[in-house]
Structure formats: C-alpha cells, structure tokens
Image (tube, coloured by chain):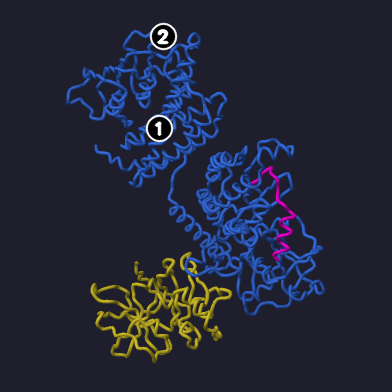
Amino acid sequence: MAIDIGQFVQTFFEESFEGLDVMEAGLLALQPGAAADLEQINTIFRAAHSIKGGSGTFGFQDVTRFTHLMETLLDGMREGRMSVTGEAVNTLLESVDCLREMLVAARENAQIDDARVQELRERLTQLLERKDTASAGESEPAAAAAPPPVQASGWRIAFRPHPQLMHSGNDPVRMFRELAELGELAVRLDASQLPRLAELKPEDCYLAWELELLGAAPREAVADVFAWVEGDCELSIEPLAEAPAAPAEVADSTAKPPPAGPAAGPATGEEGGQQGELLLERRKGEDRRRGDRRTSMTSVDSGSIRVGIDKVDAVINLVGELVTTQSMLSALGEDFDMSRIDKLHEALDQLDRNTRMLPVSSVFSRFPRMVHDISGKLGKQIELRINGEQTELDKTVIEKIGDPLVHLIRNSLDHGLETPDERARADKPETGVITLDAYHKSGSIFIEVGDDGRGLNREALLRKGLDNGLLRAGEDYSDEQIYELIFHPGLSTAKQISDVSGRGVGMDVVRRNIQDVGGSIQIASRPGKGTRITICLPLTLAILDGQLVSIGQDCYIIPLLSIIESVQIRAGEVNRIPGRGEILRFRGQPLPILRLYEMFGAEGAVTDLEKGLLVVVEADGRQVGLFVDDLQGQQQVSIKSLEKNFRRVAGVAGATILGDGRVGLILDISGLIRTNNAAI
Amino acid sequence: METKTTDLAPLGPRGALKRETAEGLQYLTFSLAGEEYGIDILKVQEIRGWAPVTKVPNAPAFVRGVMNLRGAIVPVIDLRLRFGLETIEYTKTTVVIVVMVQGATGNRVIGAVVDGVSDVLNLQAADIQPAPDFGTAVHTEFISGLVTIEAGMVMLLDVDRLLSVEEMFALEAVRPTEPVAA
C-alpha cells in the first residue's frame, strides 16, 4: 500500500501556518513578569510541537531543529524553570516570524535566510543557558519543597506498541532516531509476538522494544518523543541509575481507560496533575488528526472545511440563475405553485451566502501583534480591546478592509494616542486604549476604531480648509463637516496637517477602499477625549434588495437600503438656484434634485417634476432626491460585474438579470451624490 | 479557447461551425452594408438572433447596450455604427455574433450586431493578401487582410483591435458621437 505523502504536505503547511497564528496570539496574551499562565503556554507549546512533528515527518529538518529550540524554551517556562520575561516573549515572537518565513521558503522551495535563523537560534540558546544558570542558583534553596530535577545517567524505556500504532502514521524508527539525538541509544527488539507469515497482517505492528538511552537527557525530552503515540502503546520510562526522587511513571491509557473520558494514564511523581493535564491536551490535538477513528472522544473542532473560492462562486452563479428562472416561471403561470421552488431557492441562497461569510477575526487577528510592536517602538503604553470578532462578513469585503483598518489603527497609535507623560499631565491613565469593535446592525456590518487619545485638532483643520479654499470664510461649519476634511486628498496628504492634527497620509485612500466595497466611513472626535471612526459595510456584495424604477423605457435598480422615502413633488416647493441646480425644501432641509433622465440621456421620460416621483436616497451621510418616472416592483437581485466585459459606467454600480431575463443596471448612489457635489 | 457550435441564427446548410481542416484557417463571414467581412472563427463563441438590449447611459452610440448571456453581462456593439456607417432597422436576419476578445486586462466577451451571417471560409495563409491603404468603408487599421472569392472580396477583420473597449473609448474621445437612427 503506497501512500503518496506529497498530498499531505499542503495540509501540513496550512496547519502549520494556523499553528503559528495560535502561537503568536498566545505569546501576545502572555503577561511578562506575571505568574506564568500555564494554559496559554501549553497552547503555544502544543502548536510548536505539532509543527515540529509535522516538519520532521516531511523532512524539513531545519524547521524541526528550530522549533525544537523554541519548544525547549517554552517547556522551561511551563515548568517554571524560566520566567516569562518581555525579552523571552519578544524573541519567541521573532522566532514565530522566522519560522513562518522558513515554512514559506520550504513550501516554495526557496532559500531560507540562514543568517536570520542562525541569529535567532543563538538568541534562543542564550536564553536557555541563562535559564540554566538561574535555576542552578535558585532551585537549590527550594529543593526541600520541590523535588530536585531528576539526575539519571540514562533511561530504560519499554515500548510496546499496540498493533494499530502504524495506522495513525507513526513510525517507530523515526522516534528512535529522535531518541538517538538525545544520547547514546541501545535498542533491543522483542519479536516474540510476531505471528507466522500466513497470519501476519502487514499493517499491524507486532514488535516491541527495550531501549536504553544513555546521557543526561531530561525525562520530558524522552517523553516528548512518545507524545504522539501516547494512546497506542504501553510505555514505561525508568531511570537507569539509582535516582532518589524519581518514581517510575507508567502511562498506559488505552488498556484501562478511565470512565470519565480521555484522561491521561496514572501520572504519578513530581509533575503530578500538571503533567497529566498536559498529556490530555496533547491527546486532544492528536485526536483531531486522527479524525473519525476515535469517535468516542468528543471533538471541539467547529467542523470547518476549506473550499476554493471559485467553487463558491460557481454556486453563487447558479443561484443567480435560479433566481432568474424562478422569476420567469412565476411570470409564466400565475396559478403555478411557486412555494416549493421558493423554499428551495431560499435555502440555497442562505447556504451560499453563508459559505462566503468569514468572521472578521481573520482581519483583526493581526492587530494585537501590530499594536504590540508599534507601541514598543513608540514608547507608548497601549492596550488593544477587541470586541465582536466573530461578526461575519463577505470574504471579498474582508479582503478589502484589511489595509484601511491597518491604516486607521496605525494613525491612532502614531498620532491619536499620547505618550505616557502627556497622558499623565492630561490626567488620563498612562495606558492608552484602542478599541476595535465589530457588530451587526440593520443589515449592515459596523466596524469601529476608537482611541482615547487627544482627538482631532478642529482649529488646525479649519484653518487648512480655509487656506485650501475647501471651506468658505465666515460660514458656520459643523464638527462633522470639519472632520470630514481629513478624507480630502489635498489635505490628508499634506505633511503639515498630519503633524498638527494627528492624522496621517492617505485617509482619502482609506475612504476610497471602503467605498469600493459599497461601504461608508464616518468620523467623530472630541478634543482631549479621543477619536472614533465608524465604518459601515454591506453584509454581502453578491446579492442586494433592489427597488426597480422606470426612467423612460429603461429600468434601473436602486439599492433598497439607501432609500429613505419616495415623495411626490408639488409645485412651488422647488427652487432653482443658479449654479447649484434645483433644490426641494424637504422636511425643513434643502434637498438637491437629480434628474436621472438628463444624466442618463433617457428617451421618452417624464420631465415634469410634478408628474414623476422623487426617490430620496442617502449615502455617506448626504441626501439627494433622484427624479424618476415611477416605481416598479422590489426584487432581490444578484450583482453582476459590468466591468468584466465592458467598463465602469459613471453612476452605475453594476448590473443584474431581471425577472424577464433582461439586464437591469444598479445605480451607484454614493457615486451619484459625489458627481452631484462635484458639479455644484 | 473553445468554439461553441450553438447555431441560433439562420446559418444555412453550410453553417455548421466545425473546424474540419486541421491545417487551414477558418473565417466566419458576414455581411454589413453590402460588403463581406470575415473574422477568425476561433474568436466566435456563438451566434444569436437580435433581441432588445438594455441601454447603458453615457456610452458611445455604437454601444447598443448590454445583454444577458447566461448570467454574464455582455456589451453589444453595432458594427455599422462602429464603422461610421448608416444604421438600419433591425430585421429577422439581424444577428449578434458573440466573440471573445483579447484585451490588455484579460479576455472579454462582446456581442457584435451585423446584417447577417454568410458562410464559413476555409483558407490557407497564402490566400490572404495584405490590406490596402485606402478605399474601404472601414478604417484600414482594423483590417488584417483581404481574400478574393468567387462572389467577390472579403475583408478579414482584426477583432481584438476592432472590439477593444479601450480603443473604442479612445476613439470616442476624438470623434463626435453619431446620431442614432434606429
């Protein structure tokens, strides 16, 4: 039975990169100086261990050796032999980066940056050596309380695998090779259980071994080698020489499994419960890998599956077709019972929308690290608070908002938050807080980036706005109008303003990126209290609820979400203001009127304002009235690209297929409002 | 690229779009204002009868609009208007040739309205003569060569240039829009 190991390499890389993320998150959660958080360290350790094991199997020796060093250091922390210092955490974080690069290089058969690896190895080794000297000094007085480290001249290991050992991909030979690295190894084979050839099942393991390992390797290192086969063998590790406080530990977990569940074997001796807990957790990780072979154990996995985006898109296209066909069918025969197909369609629709949804944590996860790194560099104390990271968003949107969010958070770090001194003077806690919130409200997803820093400098912005002619002198401007200026390309790119107001370069790019995915961005700020930027994003890009409107012989679609209301215009309510077009007095506010038939050059459209309808729409906090002939029905439409085969059309966000199979164009509301403003 | 053999339009008895000769070139010929034109058959995806399209605002007049091609949005170009000729009333024989055009930003699917589809020509490279510098209704830059057949002359078109969206809009910038007479 030949297995092509190559097909698993891809999975190994994916799992390893996930493992690295876990390690990174865990390291960032560690509090340097505080008592070691065992749970966290165990999580990090497990991730490192999986990477080490996998890389060994696939022959990435560099990765294995490097991870081994990290693992040893983590092990030291776990056992309390080594304190969790800021330096150690930072070194480990850098090692995670380095490991990531090594894995990328391994995947692409590229050259690994040896110098960097070597440097980090040395730093890790240094940390490890320091531990040794430190523990030598400290642990002796404490020897009465805690048993001294086991001093054995070697270990006798009885390893009796169960027949199914090799089913799970474990290879005794590889384990022995690993043991041999720890010291001088003598192997004695016990082949007494070997059946006659005719009865031999080639996939089963009938052999047992007695191993003698000479050298000063710690017991944990030996036990580690067998970590993956914990449940598949009878194992005993005994010290070779007479060692005072080291009772034998026998871990035989499958022979007599405790009824409560997957607890480790009777772990006795100096490590007691802690070691038992560790084994248990390792077994959980192992279970995941073994999949359904151990159905008796409850899995904590959420059951995710990796699907290519092209396949998902194919499903979405099909559903789009189904929507069209359904509309055609219902138009065909009024008495035809549509409820069945309706239900089917709804279910499919829900499914494919959900498939595209990802939690925003996939974007948020990079920020703790970024805040940690930058705040260290800037000498600021900053705490990042993240809420609602499980909120789900369309994959396309997720991909697009990463960079804008990085930018916003950098701005807060760089300019928004003050140094500890400044904060102390301003009577604020020295640690600044950046909040990152995601939540779902009325069909949209909101992401808020807030800080409790110094806020925007209204005066400086106002001055700059006047200088650039963006604002008119003598007029009253609301705070929003002033803060809005930071999104203006002319202003935000000016270096001066970024020094004064505390907002950096490229806010216009941030806004454009958000608008590209159909979102909007708003800013609120209070001097000395902080700034909060709110991004509003559509739940999905693939399907929207649309209001069909007719203009002449053409039919256009207005996204339902942007519609405030529709009104009929009475004579005398409209004022024609030279240079600013037509304005309707609407609920006490001036509302610009956009005659769509003029913009689109439609023929045969209603031109008398009193005979048509005005659809009041809002985008980016501004309202405008779109003049159309009449309202048609409402319909859920799947958005299709106009650019794919043609080009971008001003005022049009995309196209869709209507119920009769014809193409309908979807209006780009924020685009229309922008053009309207530009025209004034 | 795959050539679809959907024949929705009246193609005639010889209309099967099969690529029979392995060596030679095959061109689909169509008529436009009394002239015969040919395009590389490998560019042709399908041929459809004319059906009303959705107008696109602020597009040049030769862009009749966009149509639904099994869920994809495809622009439809009137080749008469594209060549600066008088447009005519669309009839039963008016067809849309759907072609795959290679552009700078990837492949695009575009529909071209012509008066009618004529034939499939089997040619050898030696049959094709270079395009003249003048004397045709069409800008010679779109003509890749000429072929003489029994019935007369066929102009072979360079579809990638003729229907390049970038080119169409670059041209639009210098040439005023023709009135629509449909």
Hue of chain B?
Answer: yellow
- Residue situated in front as seen by the camera: A135 or A96: A135
Q: Where is residue A34 drawn, in percent x and y?
A: 57, 25
Q: CA distance from mark 1 to mark 2?
A: 33 Å
Say which mark, if any, is on residue A122: 1
Q: Which chain letter goes with mark 2?
A: A
Q: Where is residue A228 drawn, in percent x and y?
A: 37, 27
Q: Which chain letter goes with mark 1?
A: A
Say which mark, if any, is on residue A245: 2
Q: Quadrant of residue B48?
A: bottom left
Q: Residue at x 37, y 86 (%)?
A: B36
Hue of chain A?
Answer: blue
Q: Is residue A444 above or below residue A564?
A: above
Q: Residue at x 49, y 88 (%)?
A: B86
Residue A452 is one of the magenta-drawn residues? yes
Q: How many tags in the picture?
A: 2
